Amino acid sequence: MIETIDTSATPAATAATSAEKPELLIWLAGQPGDSSALTISALDAAFAGKSIVVISPDPAPVPLPPRMRWATPRSIASQSAWVLTASDFAEAAQAAREYDAPYALLLGSQNHWATPAALRALADTTGDRPADLVTPRPTPSEEHGLVNAALLYPLTRALFAAEVHYPLPTDALVSLRLLGRLENAAHRAASSANDAMLWPVSEAAVASCHVREVTLEGYTLPSPPAGAFNELFTAVAASLFADIEAKASYWQRARIFTPATTTSWSAPTSATEVSAEVQELVENFRLAYTNLHDLWSLVLPPQTLLALKRLSLASAETFSLAPQVWARIVYDFALAYRLRTLNRGHLLGALTPLYMAWVASHTRAAEVDPASGLNMMTETAQAFELERGYIVARWRWPDRFNP
Amino acid sequence: MGQQIGSALRQSIHRVVLVLANFLPGIAAFLLAVVFFTLIGWGLSVLLRRIFVSLRFDERLASRQPNGTTPSVADWSPSHSPTLLASRFVFWGCVLIGVAVGLSAFDASYSANSTISIFLLPYVTHITGAVLLVLAGSILARFLARSVLIGAVNAQMQYARFLSLGVKWLVLVLAGAMALDHLQVGGHIVELAFGILFGGIVLTLALAIGLGSRDLVTRSIERNIDRPFAPKPTESQPPSEPETSRSKLRHF
């Protein structure tokens, strides 16, 4: 780190600031110029009176706020990164150790939400038990991210018992202890790619760290760079499945509470007009069913294939993929990823149309009843929890269930 | 006359028996070498597997493996086990050495001017090469066909299966022609037939894609033509949303 000290301050104040142990390290990820003056002033207002160190690719502001130290990271984040990457965690851990900071607040490149109040809420670790990881969540009305609702949140909740709605955070507060673990994972991941994704929530669950989620007013999820959805979906799913595979010994052993009841799910039967978007998604699913049925039959058991056949014959008005069927599909694909039943690129490519079927089902449900659309995230997560025994059994004895 | 026919038959039988008598020791030597080296390979692979299991080789390698999509030795191994990969590699290596030693013994059992040795051995090598070519071609064809099928389905192409089949048969025809050429069977006929078939498949695919994508291209051209004439936004009339942002779905 190349540290900058405020030269306008008195020499005594400068020496005192340098020797002081910071209470918080702030890691501003992203490209130079992204960490705007707005964030700096918000940080100053949020942590006034606290000793903080800011690591940012931007040059230090002049004058530097009192009790704030500024340093530049050793490397600049990857251009393509839209979430916190392995190199972000590794460098933040190194900096936190170097400055002996107990916590690091990692902020992504899209931090327009960063008001002083929001920053203070995210950095608040007090409670019954000090938190090792604090992640932000938008207010429910602002929640987006269908991949998160269909895949990331349900899997993380079911396998790692972590009630964190966004397991792939772009902003997070991490303790030094958890950062150490993430640094090890990052070093392993960094040998393949510096912009590899890490899953701090599952890492925290394995390390028995306390995780907390704070709902932030005005918080918005970052948008990935514009480009092909298929590549992005494949990359995220591959990273998640690899993480599940790496932590199989944990989630197979863990005694996680399974809900006895779930909210009832029923296929939409309303005569509400089908939107063109849903119609297109349904037609795409039918096309995929015709062409990819043979590939799916290598991965999915007959019961699921039958459900997919029925779905392909259903009209757009009643098109609905039951959460339990979707949960089993994801679990079967996670297992096939582990067993390499198919080439992994092909496998994740074959999962994409099934995810689109879930999207069609979700969108149709929201058309018929907007309230049920909002509950879809919870319903899907509950279905994943109910079907947890299925993945545990299949993971242990994959041949017994072979299609 | 009868005596002459009988004598000719006896002589030909004698010659065939003689050739077989010369041929059998070579075959026996070949089989013996293969069986011997297979047994050695089996023994070595079992020994290697036990050593690796006792050293916890798989666990050590897995602990060094990154937590993402990392290419490593384990990615190439059967059932995701490097131990199994190493033991199978040793086994099949020994089998191959056995085949090589057997062929050498087979060759040595003939005199240098033996016609069978001169014609048969190079042909066996060519057949092996051709079989490998066809095998590699069929594996590549399957892989490419699946890649094209999945890519085309995810791009919502109606003719995905047709495209995939076309690619598959292109590669298979190429592999077949290469194998026949390697065997020196057919000569120019194979080249000609291959050219016609390959060209035919490419033309069919081009026509299919061209005709199938007609609407798509028309829409794309229409969009490009319409764009400059789009009305400028005014205070009372907000700018119309681009077509790409029509979808309300947000995946990430």
Image: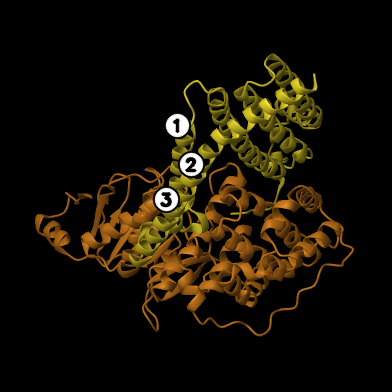
Name the amino acid, label 2. Answer: Ala
Tell me the residue at 70%/64% (across/down): A403
| Res. B178 visible in picture | yes
Q: Is residue A145 above or below residue A391?
A: above
B5 or A292: nearer the eye? B5
Q: Mark 2 — residue?
A: B29
Q: Is residue A235 above or below residue B15?
A: below
Quadrant position of residue A78: top left
Please identify the residue farthest to the left as the structure is shown: A12
Mark 1 and mark 2 residues within 8 Å of each other at the beta carbon: yes
Tell me the residue at 57%/34% (across/down): B128
Marks 1 and 2 sit apart, C-alpha to C-alpha, by: 10 Å
Disc 3 on helix, strand or loop?
helix
Q: Nearer the viewer, mark 2 or mark 3?
A: 2
What colouring method underlies this structural image? by chain
Quadrant position of residue A123: bottom left
Q: Mark 1 — residue?
A: B108
Q: Are marks 3 and 1 on the same chain?
A: yes
A25 or A317: nearer the eye? A317
The numbered mark, 3 or 1, whose residue comes first in the sequence reads 3
The numbered mark, 1 or 2, whose residue comes first in the sequence reads 2
Chain orange in the figure, letter: A
Residue A367, numbered circle: none
Q: Which x, y percent locates residue A143?
A: 60, 63
In the image, taking residue A303 as reference, residue A350 lies left or right, namely left
* Mark 2 surroundings: few (<14), some (14-19) or many (≥20) residues within 10 A: some
Chain yellow in the figure, letter: B
Mark 3 and mark 1 residues within 8 Å of each other at the beta carbon: no
The numbered mark, 2 or 3, whose residue comes first in the sequence reads 2
In the image, taking residue B57 as reference, residue B215 lies left or right, namely right
